[in-house]
Amino acid sequence: MAKSLLRSGSLADFFALGENGQPVYASALQLRETLRLRRQQTIADCLAIPQPNETGDRLDWYAPGEGKVTSWMAAGEAEREAALEQLQTCLTTVAALSERALASDSAAQQRFGALLAKAFQFPAANYVYLVGGRPVITFWGFINLDQKPRTYALECLREALPVITAQPLVDPIAPPIPQPNAAAVYAETASLPVEPENEPEEVPKVAIPAMPPTASRKSALRRWWWVAPGVALAGALVWQFRAGVPGKPITSEPVVAHTPEKRVLPATDKTKEAEVIAQNATQIAPPPVAAETPPEAEKAPVVAHPEAAPVVAQKAAPAPSTPPVETVVAETKPEEAKPVDKNALVMPILSVKLGKTDFLNGTWRVTADIKTPTIGKPASLRYQLKDGQGSVRLTHGEGVTCRANVSAGLMQSGNLIINSRVKARCSDGSRYQMPEIVCSQGANGPAECSGRYDDDNLIPLTFKRESE
């Protein structure tokens, strides 16, 4: 007995799978009962119980047991992994049962095997629920209108699991970011050593007047009087050296200018400090040299600007080229005014918005540049539709006719879908796969339609209404 309603939906929104014109959902109760009799209650409990409404165009899906209902997307990772393992076990058992039934000589067993093989197909992961921690599939035996049966029925459930587990793996990769910071710290420390070398020389100057006693002040002056000339000389050398470095790249190499300055001060130990300062200055000096070279390159193009000015003035003269734009617009108007064939398929905007297919009522002849897979000659299609239902008749070049029931409906995107749920029966006893037709209406003109068979190749089709 059904316990809780899991999901409801319209049959027009899905493509029902089946065998020989018998959809899977129409035999849902028989399939579940057969599984129970074969002691496969676990598999039966994974399949929700469908209940059609009064008109038969909608299905309500109920849980086969009691328990807390959780959607697949809202369930935790551990719950989904456990449910997926259970579904995988059931799918393996179903595949074995289906193969055994298809190999049987009984027609009923073969039909059971064919329907059971398509039972675990469902539209998407959000059609699976956990009832009491156990997985339950709704709309089993259905797929979306724009998709094909999956080779691995549970593929959409496995795709949802890596999204959660992959996120923690990205965080540990973040630590390599501190490397640029180390380079920035090195760049900052490389620019600082110039100032600490000047500070030890300026400290004695500030500390000398800070001594309150007169005697100590005189003794300090007597003790450090010889430092003042050295400091002044070193400062002058540094100033001259810094003032001379930027101008040297213009005349000669900077190495020639530094050699005499290092040999001028052999008399005192302070000259060694000056040499160190000069060496540090040479390490810092190259960046301004590189910065000053571009202005020389920029000076050359400055002369070219007066020549470029008249060129711009000459190019501005052909500006009256705008009138041809008006002629182009005028040429497109006659193309929009082309009349549409009264027998061509046109999808009215109002009918598309309301979801009505009354504009399809009647008989339509469909032509396409296709070859039949068996005969190799062009085939003609004739659709007869009314209120979204009807039939199609296909005629081979050799006079073989095939017939099948079709249904038509409008998608939310505004596209028209015409499809047959089963293969057409032909007069020679063969079966023929009918194309899935998709039509879309442009801004003007007839609707653009294309057909698709088992492969992904689209074939342009043309609809023409036949007079009654």
Image (spheres, rainbow, N blue to C red):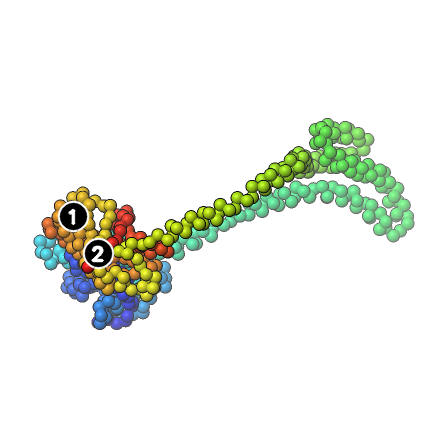
Total marks placed: 2
For this view, does 104 lie left or right of residue 54?
A: left
For this view, does 38 lie left or right of residue 200?
A: left
Residue 126 image-quadrant placement: bottom left
User: Going by the picture, which residue comes out furthest to the left?
Assistant: 105
Is 301 located above or below residue 366 in the figure? Answer: above
Q: Earlier in the sequence, mark 2 or mark 1?
A: 1
Looking at the image, can residue 383 be seen? Answer: yes
| Mark 1 Cα shell of 10 Å, populated few (<14), some (14-19), many (≥20) | some
Closest to the observer, 104 or 251: 251
Q: Residue 268 in the image: x percent, y percent?
A: 81, 33
**Disc 2 target residue:** 466
Q: Residue 44 in the image: x percent, y percent?
A: 21, 63
- The label on residue 422 is none
Closest to the observer, 216 or 360: 360
| Mark 2 Cα shell of 10 Å, populated few (<14), some (14-19), many (≥20) | some
Q: Residue 259 in the image: x percent, y percent?
A: 74, 28
Q: Secondary structure at mark 1?
A: loop
Three-letter code, disc 2: Glu
Q: Residue at x 43, y 54 (%)?
A: 168
Three-letter code, disc 1: His
**Disc 1 target residue:** 396
Closest to the observer, 372 or 311: 311
Looking at the image, can residue 32 be seen? Answer: no
Is 229 located above or below residue 336 in the figure? Answer: above
| Quadrant assignment for the N terminus | bottom left
Q: Residue at x 74, y 41 (%)?
A: 197
Is 265 located above or below residue 195 in the figure? Answer: above
Q: Residue 343 in the image: x percent, y percent?
A: 26, 56
Q: Residue at x 55, y 47 (%)?
A: 178
Q: Secondary structure at mark 2?
A: loop
Q: Residue at x 78, y 36 (%)?
A: 240
